[in-house]
Structures are given as structure tokens and as C-alpha cells.
Image: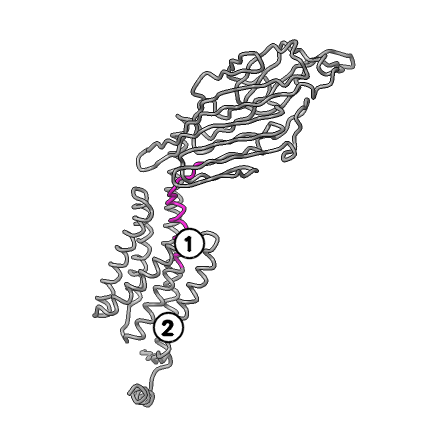
Amino acid sequence: MNITLSKSQRTLLKGFTTGFLILLMLIPAAFVHELIEERKQRQQEVVTEVTSRWAGNQTLTGPYLLLPYRTEVLVSGKPAIVTKPWVLLPDSLQAEGQLQPESKRRSIFEVALYRSQLRLRGHFRLDVLTPEQRAAIDWSKATLCMGVSDLRGIENEVQGQLGSLPVRFEPGLPDNMVTLRGVSAVLNLQGQAAEKPLAFDLPLQCRGAQQLQLVPLGKTTRMQLQSTWPSPSFQGHFLPTHQTDAKGFKANWQVLHFNRDFPQLWTDKGYSVNEFAFGVSMLQPTDHYTQTLRSVKYAILFIGLSFAFFFLLEQLMLRQVHPVQYVLIGMALIVFYTLLLSIAEVWQFRAAYAVATIATVGLVSVYTRQLFGNWRSALMIGGFLSALYGFIYILINLEDSALLVGSIGLFVLLALAMYASRRIQWYGTSPHHQRADISIEG
């Protein structure tokens, strides 16, 4: 049984087929998305491996004083004398330092590391304690503590000055009321005048990976950092005033005790002080995985517009393109993303995008020449794809205005498609209409 379809029916069937093929191409696009996620995870594994032998993200907490005091409590209904620690935070804390960036390569992956030279200065005020509290404290066993989240990063003997006393830290903390890891030094503060500020000066050289943060323990906390790293990302609850250019950055923070919810003196209670940490993260200048993922998100738009252009070209050129040929063209557009991903891992993203674009546009253009039998069609599709790839590149490099630019671009493309299809007779053309068109054109 033979079924003969009219021209309008054939056009409608081809339109539905093209739409189905556009949806079908989402399957390989999803596989490419998974491939990018897998490569990104592999990069993170390399970062974890390198930092396990170097040091991880560093968070500095302190310095602060642990002051043991004697108090009477009931044990099994009987009074007993026990020793508990008072936590005394500095009245003033100022951190100054430099970050010296380093990069370690493992295979094709690069990990951002740093060495830091810091100096922590400030003072404690002992007069915040009442006379009764000061009398109950064992000043001969006061402990100066400083939290360091990854002790592997410490590169020198941690020594400094507290008042007139030299300080030599040892690893470990006597108590985890403030933080979990760090260094401490037991000092004899017997006879220290309560009215006189107890100043400290603590140099610290440490290394880490990607991020350095400070917990604002001071009643007034200031930090000043500078580095030659050109692409910092400022992290935490507090943003600095900063200057950033191609030569690096300078940043200044100031945090008051009103800006966080823990006191300067406490006992018998723990506070989550680390959640108020602030600092800087060393972003990779070219995060090609993120950019490639953003480009894949536009795959349905790209394939849909390309197929729609071929469909219109069929109607204008009065040539038929087989669905299998649509699939081959769609696979060429998908292979663009695998080319982009693989080349971007060894080159800069911009160069990888250019190479993948030239290769894909060239392949599809030559194939179009074979389909339609003329270079005019090939140049039309080549120009269309080049403009589309350029448009997508602009979108993936925009952030806040990507939606606005994308919406305007789609509106322009729709207007061009409507203009190009204005003379297509979707229901077929009768000889009378053909003659009328010819007379009007003449």
C-alpha cells in the first residue's frame, strides 16, 4: 500500500522529525556533561593528593589565653575544689603578612599553593577579670594558645613575645573550647599587673593550599594581606577594602567584637568561633572545567538553532537532508565539547575554544558543501555557526548580564529566522502563485 504525502505534509513530517532529533541529541550531550564532571573530580583528587603532602587550607585562630582557676563544685553531694579554664581573648589583634603563590603540576593538572609570612600583634587586658576571679587563677600555669588548622604547614619554630616573656610554642592544645588544632605555650604570668596591657608579637611562617583565613578573636581585629596572585576571591563573613590588578592584590579587613556573637571572656562553654573566619582564596585564573560546563548548558540551544537553520536551508534550496545526515551533523556539534575539554586541559581555554570552533565549523561546512552541491550553502552555514560559537563564548564569559545578552541574542536570531522564511510556501505553491511571484519580482 503506497501512501502519497503532499508537500505540506512532507514539510510537517520533516519538522517533527527534526524536533525529535534535537531532543535525541540531548543524550550524548548528557554523556559529555558527565565526562566533564568526571575530569573535574579527577582534578580535585589531584589537589587532595598534592595538599596531603604540602598542607591544606589554613585557618588561624588566636592567640588567646587559657587561665586555670580554682572553683568549688558539688561532687556526689559533697563540695570539692576543681580547676577550670577561663578563655581570655585579645583586646586588640592585628595580622600583617604576604602570600607568595606557588604552583605544583601533577600530570596535566595544576594546584595553587602558597607560602605565607605573617606577624600577629596586639595585646590582652587583664582588668576585664574581677579581683575575685584574678585571685582564683593559677597565674603560674597560664597557657598562650594559637589555632592552626593544618600543622603540617608550619615552616619554622613558632616563637614570639608576650609582655616581657619569651614564648616558645609546642604542638597541641590543652583544651578544645576554642579550636581543635594548634600550638600552645605554658607561661608564668605571676605578678603581672592587671592594669597594664599584656602585649604580644608572634611571627609565623606557614604554607597552605588555596585558602588562608583568620578568626577575629580580637575586640578589634585587623588584617592586611598582599600577594602577587592576580585573581583572589575574598571569603568569609567580612569583605575587605582592596586593590586588585595584574600585579596582585592588597586587602585590609577590620572586624569589631560587635560583628560576631561570642564574648571576650568565657568559661564552661564552647562557641563556634571558626564560622566567623575571613580571608582570601586563590582562584585559578582559568577554570576551564567551569567554563566548559557552562558551554555544555547551551548545547540544546546550539543544536536546536543549527538544525533549524538546516531545515530552513532545505526549504530555501529545495534540497532534502536525510535524518541520518542530521544525526551526523549533531554528533559533529557534540564532538566540539569533547575537543574543547581535552584541549583546554593542556592549553588556555580561549585557545582551546578557537581550535575546537575552527575544527567543527570546517567539518560541518565541508559536509554541507557535499549535501547541497555548492559553496554558497557551505559559507552560509559556516558563517552561521561561527557567529553562534562567538555568541556562546561571550555568554559563558558573562555572569550578571548573561541572561540579558542571551535574551537579546535569541530575539535577534528569531527575527532573522522569520525574515529568512518569509517567502517559503509551507502549504505548497500552485502554478498560479508561482506566476504571480514571478510577475511581482519582475
**Structure colour scheme:** one colour
Q: Residue furthest right?
A: 77
- The image position of residue 385, as x and y in percent, is 31, 61
- The relative height of residue 145 versus residue 310 in the rendered view (above or below) is above
Q: Is residue 327 left or right of residue 57?
A: left
- Which amino acid does the dot numbered 2 rest on? Leu
Asked which secondary structure carries label 2, the reply is helix
Cα–Cα span, label 1 and label 2: 28 Å
Which residue lies at the image location 38% right of the left edge and 63% below the top edge? Answer: 304
The residue segment tinted magenta is 282-300
Q: Disc 1 marks which residue?
A: 297
Q: Residue furthest front?
A: 196
* Quadrant of the image containing the C terminus: bottom left
- The image position of residue 193, as x and y in percent, is 67, 13
Q: Nearer the viewer, mark 1 or mark 2?
A: 1
User: Is 403 within the magenta?
Assistant: no
Which residue lies at the image location 50% right of the left edge and 28% below the top edge? Answer: 96
- Closer to us: 271 or 402: 402
Label ID, residue 13: 2
- Which amino acid does the dot numbered 1 rest on? Lys
- Sequence-first tag of 1 and 2: 2
